[in-house]
Image: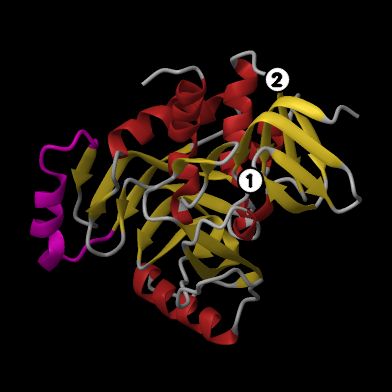
Amino acid sequence: MKTQAEIVVLGAGIAGLCAARVLHEAGREVLVVARELGEASRVPDALLNPVRGKRGTVAPEAEEALEALWDFYPRFGAVRQGILRPVPQSDRPVWQQKLQGRRIPHLWLEEGLYLENAGWLETTPLLHRLAEGLNILYAEVKRLEENTLWLEDGRRLSGKVLVYAGGASGAHLVGLGGRFTPGSVLLTQQHFKQARSYGVYVAGHSLGGSYLPHQDRYAPHQTQPHEVEWLLAEAQKLLGYRPAFSASWAGVRYRLDRHYLKEIPGGFALTGFGSAAYFYAPLYARRLLKRLTGQS
């Protein structure tokens, strides 16, 4: 195996795979190093949502992110279009004001706000398609020093440029700080073709949206009974009933407060998206390529 590459991407979650795919298609030599495919990005179904939370906050750079993701994801799999936000009548004027002047196609229906070019996707098929044809080494990285990686088995790898896209579990390798937020998703027996989101969301076979208090360092998370009860209670408000579920997924969201692409010794960090990784990953993969080619 080669011990050097032009660009080493550390992490095979959605940010790392989008970056590696964009760089690979641009003709760059890319080696992806990761413990496993998908890593924390294996949440069963992911929303592509430009208007977030119960306050109707429009995501920063929402228009650019939507354009990039619709240009990118459909090449690798199905993306279901549209999200219904059942906003209470009393809150709608505030939401309308926040959307005023923004280029985000939407309709106000009796049930609430329908975001026409928002959507959702199944993550596992997408991750596998993105990985096809990429040079991926599955290994544990124990130490990182600028653009050199030391693996658990003693091997050493280096690249002209390192791109750290390892998310929460590897954040200690680059010492970026940030917030670590545990959360869970229930895998429902019912399939929700129409995504709905207010407090929690349903899409595909997922009922998600639990957030536990932020932590200042990474620790693995397992779904707690009180999370399950909270998710089902919120689903009752959203749907009018509690959907049956068969299993749960637990993960830790890593957030860097919008500093998603920054220079670090030896290269760049592309991480810290929190729950919006699928929304922003194609846009920031493009921006990474521009930075590497010296474009503004």
Quadrant location of residue 89?
Answer: bottom left
Q: Is mark 2 on a helix, strand or loop?
A: loop
Residue 32 percent across, percent down from the top left: 72, 35
Residue 154 percent across, percent down from the top left: 90, 49
Say above or below: 71 vs 243: above
Question: Of 133 and 268, which appears nearest the observer?
Answer: 268
Residue at x-position 45% and y-position 78%: 213
Q: Mark 2 points at which residue?
A: 29
Quadrant location of residue 16?
Answer: top right
Q: Name the residue under label 1.
A: 13
- Pointers 1 and 2 in contact (C-beta within 8 Å): no
Quadrant location of residue 265?
Answer: top right
How far apart marks 1 and 2 lie (CA) works out to: 19 Å
Residue 226 percent across, percent down from the top left: 53, 86
Q: How crowded is mark 2: few (under 14 residues within 10 Å), some or many (20 or more)?
A: some
In the image, the segment drawn in magenta is 86-105
Mark 2 residue type: Glu
Q: Quadrant of the N terminus?
A: top right
Say above or below: 263 vs 234: above
